[in-house]
Amino acid sequence: MATGLMIIGCGKATKKLGNFLNSSKEYVFEASFGQSTDSYDAKGQITATTDYYPSQAQIIAELDNFRGQIEQLPPAFSALKVSGKRAYKLARQGQKVNLEPRSVKIEELLLIDYYDHKALFKVKCSKGTYVRSLAHDLGQACGSLAYVSQLERTAIDQYQLNQAISFENLAEAIAKQDFSHFINCD
C-alpha cells in the first residue's frame, strides 16, 4: 500500500545506508474518516465504524496537538518486538499486543485537502513515527475514526522523491551498467 522514495545503496555506498535510519522522513498520506481498522490502514480488517465525520475546521484545529514532541502508541501490526517476537506476527495470530508509547517528533503536519470524508496530509517526522498511528489518533481526537488509505514517502533526509528513478529505470541502468543518473553519496 505504501509507495514513494526508497534509498538503495550499492558498492561502497551500502556502508552509509545506516545513516538514513535516524533521518527525518516526509510523507503525503490520505486518512479516511468513519472507520478504523486493526492495522490502522486500508489493508486491515474493519474494527469499528461511525457516522460522525469531522469538518475541515475541526481537523485543522486538532493538528497543533500532533505537532512537536508527542507520545505515540505504535499499531499492533508493526515490526516492533514483544517478548522477542514481531508484534505483527502476534497480531495476525489474534493475540493481544501490548506496546508502550514512544516519543516521536512531528516537525510539520499540514492538511492539503479534504474531500468525501477523506483528508490529504503532508507530514515531516522523526525516525520511529508511525503515520498509521497518527491518522488513527487524529481520527479519535476529532471524535471520529480514521485509517490511512494511501501513503507515499516523499523525502528521506535531504533526498526528495522527484530525484528518484523508477524500478524500471534502475533495472535498465543495471543492465547497461550506466549509473550516470544516480546520486553519488561519497
Image (spheres, rainbow, N blue to C red):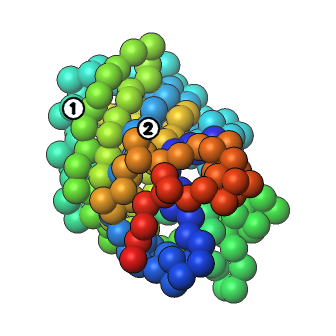
Q: Nearer the viewer, mark 2 or mark 1?
A: 2
The label on residue 29 is 2
Given residues 13 and 29, the one toward you in this image is 13
Above or below, comparing residue 166 to residue 85 in the picture = above
Left or right of 166: which side holds 84?
Answer: right
Which mark sits nearer the N-terminus, 2 or 1?
2
Looking at the rendered image, the quarter that the C terminus falls into is bottom left
For the residues labelled 2 and 1, say whether their Cβ atoms are less than 8 Å apart: no
**In the image, what residue occupies the spot 36% across and 56% down?**
159
The residue that label 1 is drawn on is 60
Above or below, comparing residue 149 to residue 56 in the picture = below
Q: CA distance from mark 2 to mark 1?
A: 15 Å
Residue type, label 1:
Ile
Above or below, comparing residue 130 to residue 22 in the picture = above
**In the image, what residue occupies the spot 45% across and 32% down?**
30
**In the image, what residue occupies the spot 69% across and 86% down?**
84
